[in-house]
Image (cartoon, rainbow, N blue to C red):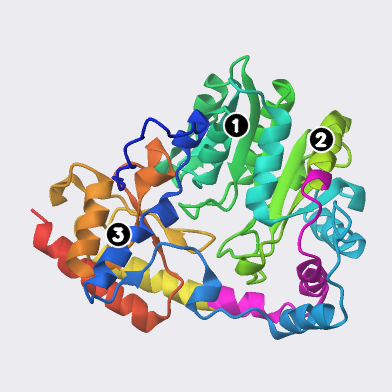
Amino acid sequence: MPSSPPPSPSPSSLSISRHVAGVEYAIRDIIHYAKEQERKGNRVIYLNIGDPVLYGFGTPKHVKDAMVRAVLEDKNYYAESEGVRELREAIAERESAKGMHVVPEDVVVTNGVSEALDMIISSIAEPGDEVLVPGPCYPPYLSYARVRGVKPVEYATLEHEGWRIDMDDLRGKITGKTRAIFVINPNNPTGSILDEHTLEALVDTAVEHNLYLVCDEIYDRIVFDRFTSIGRYARDAPVVILNGFSKVYLMTGWRLGYICLNSNARSLDGLRASIGKLARLRLSANTPAQIAAIEALRGPQDHVDDMVSKLNARREYVMRRLDAMSGVNMYVKPRGAFYIFPRIDGSLGYSSDAEFVLDLLKSKNMLVVHGSGFGSMGYMHFRLVYLPSLDVLEDAMNRLEEFVGSHYR
């Protein structure tokens, strides 16, 4: 995706780390093109950011009430660096129920999963080391590695098999420099869910090669099919689970996530110590938000089924419309999260996915994300968020249908 050219350095310019040059976040980087359209007086439909709160899925009232109470009761102090004890207990209970043995001492509360990811990479890898990431994958997995001087190596997922991980390809990319395998399940951007055989194979591979196995499960309850946590196969393997409150509990702007280490894995003792140091270094996560998160975990859960039901209807609608559009009707049915990742057919005449996305924006004022923004294996795809209401999605699909119809050969 082309970006605005940086200003030419002057003789007095100060140096900037070369590692920052590799930092990209396509989902937000692309927004400035949409703002240009808005400055021209056009109304843009944004289908780029996976924020359910922006699309009418409100934070549950009992969670908001807990946040307000915490603030009014002046619980506005620094929390324990690892997190409020009661919240860590609730998180340990939740993750243990999914299958991995976790005690509160194995939990660190973070400022979103993004900080958790940075803490993990900073702890396990030196500049020049490598980490394996899924192709395609959520952009911060690529960028946080690069900013630490670590090389992200994409392993293949097989689109024609529902974006199943190609375990032969993954194993073939393990080298003496590899430090970890990263997994996103359910996946962003494809919406795929890993089967139990693959989860077990991942654990076995991590143990065989003495690698960390880090699994992001932030969409674990936003699923339309069977979901199994990797924790169910963790045994005493070096498994680390990342999760948070943004998606399931509709707390995106509150920036609250967590790291869970497998209590049975003594091989994680060094990582426990390192993450503890980093947690103390940044002081703590937001205290009132943590107190509210206790209520999120232990209070009513009715909103989850309601959200998934609405999302399922929106998913089915988008798929039905895509099926009728030659040129973008090749996609894998998403089984979790709230994204769909269609392939851009060569018959539309585009030389790149970025060109397609920018032309769609300029022609129809509709913003999606180019697939190559999720790594090289996302090339000639685009990610569409189906969070908006059905009337907004109908408008968007009408625009997309007109667009591809005018280009299909």
Q: Is residue 271 above or below residue 220?
A: above
Q: Give the residue type that dot 3 points to.
A: Tyr
Within 10 angstroms of label 3, few (less than 14), some, or many (20 or more) residues?
some
Residue 335 in view of the camera: yes
Determine the secondary structure under disc 3. Answer: helix
Q: Residue at x 63, y 33 (%)?
A: 181
Residue of label 2: 274
Quarter of the picture containing the N terminus is top left
Depth order, front residue of 76/130:
76
In the image, which residues are magenta? 280-309
Q: Name the one closer to the observer, 321 or 184.
A: 184
Instruction: Please tell me which of labels 3 and 2 falls first in the chain.
Output: 3
Answer whether residue 203 is visible to the viewer in this image.
no
Q: CA distance from mark 1 to mark 2?
A: 16 Å
The residue that disc 1 covers is: 148
What residue do we see at 42% from left, 33% from top? 12
